[in-house]
Image (tube, rainbow, N blue to C red):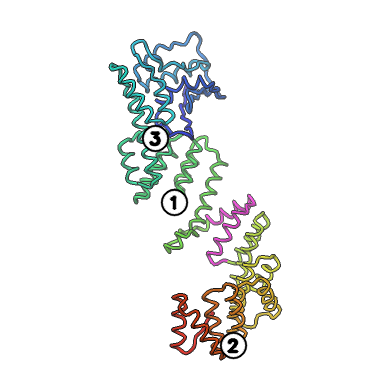
Amino acid sequence: MPVTLRPLLRASAPAMVSVIALLAGTGMAAAQGTATPRSGAESLAPGVRVEVQPSTPATGTVDETALRYYARIRDMEKLEAEIRRLKALHPDWQTPTDLFSRTPDSPVDERPIWDLIGDGRFAEARARVAELRGRYPGWSPSQAMLDTLAMGEDRTRLVSASDAKQWRTVVEIADRHPALISCSSVDSMWRLAEARAELGDPDAAFGLYRTIVSTCDNAQERRATLQKAGTILPSDQVEQLVAIERGRVGTDPAALQQVVGGLRRGELAAAMSPEARKSGTRPQVTAETLDAVKADVEAGRDADGAMLVAWYLMEQGQAGEAEAWFRKAEGWGAKEAGLRGRIQALTRQGKTAEAARLARSSGLGRDYVDSMSAMLGRQTNAPRAMVVDFATWAEEKHDARAAIALGWWHSRREDPATAALWFENALAWGGGDEAVEGLALGLQGSGQTARFQALEQQYAGRSARLTKFFSGLRGSGGGGGG
């Protein structure tokens, strides 16, 4: 009967790329009382089990002669095959715990060394080998042990190089030890794929991801591979990987759909990332992808997803639709974040008075100042009641940003004396260089020459910005602000 030998990697130790070392840990598993997994799965050692499909058991005593012979000569391939054969014939049979015990013709019990290798303690294993060689001159470790030890050491070096972003070193190690790149060490394959992509070879990265999705048995690792590919590969290649996974027998449709939904949201997030803004070449999000994300968010009433959609729409200049999505986010639990987003969406649409009222009534001071500043910047004849309320609030809160907004508003209304008063307040409340500039213009415009000169003497050399400002003001005989 077909049998699957599947390594279950321990989080606390580097993953082994071969079952060789883990088989040797059988004695330790037995000593620790490892429970036999259900559904026909038997623990061979820490991190390894054999799963056997139901079969008609054979009768009679289990003949372990071949099994022990293969263990003694360290023919691991035949040993694994014999274990599978015996488990298929005798489902209740337990793998012996003494396969790697000292044999009559060997003075050394190798199990402690294998245990060290299985735990990822490679330096200790090397030291133990050296110690035993000195104690027993005629003894040498098996080639299987040396190969497994070397492979584990190389994997540790690969992980260290990957963590340090030494991409060429990662590739060199993988090239030197190709057995590392297998389904028994998917993490190594992920790291190599990342290195290939960082070195400018995304097709090689795609090939590695495709190998995992096409051939590896662990469904969770395959889904994680799709997620990793989504951060590196273009969307068309990711879709190819998704199609491969969807076509595999036994794929969990719900789990896969959850991953696909996350990938699509990742496309929206990538389009808004600082890196995309800086490069000026933002990834294109198709209408189909956006619609799929919207449908997924609606189905789950997902507040975070609604916020993502809303901010993406804001980036696309669709503030009206974004406002609707911010409302949904509010209703689904993101109350303050959704409200603040809605205020910004209203402001972006030019509905500054509505935005200001909403912010004021909600106690969102910063958003209130933002929306009122936007309104005052656009309307010299803003509603008087709102301006008075804003001025009262600014004085109560000693808010420099609000005072600056009022100062520029009065400047545009050709009321430099009142503007100067507000800029003076702003300066007292920590308004900085902009408050100084506004005050200078207000004093100059209202004919307060002595105060203007005193201000210039005090602040002209305080910053490069103010030095340039006062120099330009003297040269032109005037100036402007806002």
Quadrant where the C terminus is found in the figure: bottom right
Q: Give the label on residue 236, or none.
A: 1
Depicted 372 relative to depicted 196: above or below: below
Q: Earlier in the sequence, mark 1 or mark 2?
A: 1
**Residue in view at x 68 percent, y 69 percent:** 360
Magenta residue check for 299: yes
* CA–CA distance in space, label 1 to label 2: 58 Å
Residue linked to disc 2: 414
Depicted 174 relative to depicted 30: above or below: below
Magenta residue check for 206: no
Identify the secondary structure beneath mark 2: loop
Q: For the residues carrying marks 2 and 3, which lies nearer the camera in this image?
A: 2
Please indicate whether residue 451 sits to the left or right of residue 361 in the image: left
Identify the secondary structure beneath mark 3: loop
Q: Earlier in the sequence, mark 2 or mark 3?
A: 3
* CA–CA distance in space, label 1 to label 3: 25 Å
Residue linked to disc 3: 182
Say if mark 1 contacts mark 2, CB within 8 Å.
no
Mark 3 burial class by Cα count in 10 Å: few <14, some 14-19, many 20+: some
Identify the secondary structure beneath mark 1: helix
Residue type, mark 3 in image: Ser
Residue type, mark 1 in image: Asp
Say if mark 1 contacts mark 3, CB within 8 Å.
no
Stretch in magenta? 289-318
Q: Give the label on residue 171, or none.
A: none
Q: Earlier in the sequence, mark 1 or mark 3?
A: 3
